Image: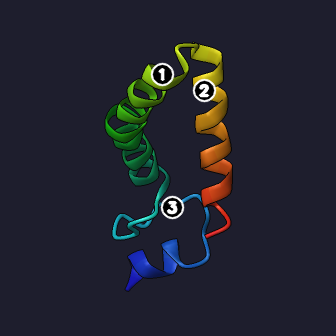
């Protein structure tokens, strides 16, 4: 009861049951980078044979998927 009053509407107290708290989001993005991004980079780089073009294409893909 007291703990709930302390954390209720208090941005300085982290709700550990929140699946989208900053540390959990950071973990998900780290896993995404380590697994999916690396695989996609290697596959696209095999096509483009140019690191900057590969990164540019991955950036475009990332921007486009935010619309879905």
Q: Residue at x 49, y 52 (%)?
A: 22
Q: Residue at x 61, y 63 (%)?
A: 11
Residue 56, horizontal then vertical, whole percent: 67, 29
Tell me whether circle 1 and circle 3 mark residues in contact (CB < 8 Å): no
Measured in 3D between alpha carbons, the distance from the residue under mark 1 to the one under mark 3, in whole angstroms, is: 43 Å
Circle nearer the N terminus (2, 1): 1
Provide the residue designation for mark 3.
13
Farthest residue to the front: give it: 47
Front tag of 1 and 3: 1
| Separation (CA) of disc 2 from disc 1 | 9 Å
Q: Nearer the viewer, mark 2 or mark 1?
A: 1
Are dots 2 and 3 in contact, CB under 8 Å? no
Q: Which residue is pictured at 61% across the width and 47% down the height?
A: 61
List the residue tagged with mark 2: 55
| Helix, strand or loop at mark 1 | helix
Residue 39 located left or right of residue 53: left
> Could you say which is closer to the camera, residue 16 or residue 41?
41
**How many residues crowd around disc 1 within 10 Å: few (fewer than 14), some, or many (20 or more)?**
some
Q: CA distance from mark 2 to mark 3?
A: 37 Å
Q: Total label count? A: 3
Residue count near mark 3 (Cα–Cα under 10 Å), binned few <14, some 14–19, many ≥20: few
Residue at the disc numbered 1: 45
Q: Nearer the viewer, residue 53 or 6?
A: 53
The image shows residue 47 at horizontal and vertical percentages of 48, 25
How is the protein colored in the picture?
rainbow
Q: Nearer the viewer, residue 2 or 13?
A: 13
């Amino acid at each position: 009861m007291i703990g709930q009053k302390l954390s209720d509407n208090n941005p300085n107290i982290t709700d550990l049951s929140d699946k989208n708290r900053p540390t959990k989001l950071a973990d998900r993005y780290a896993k995404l980078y380590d697994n999916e991004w690396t695989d996609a980079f290697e596959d696209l780089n095999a096509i483009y044979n140019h690191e900057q073009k590969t990164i540019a294409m991955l950036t475009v893909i990332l921007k486009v998927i935010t619309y879905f």
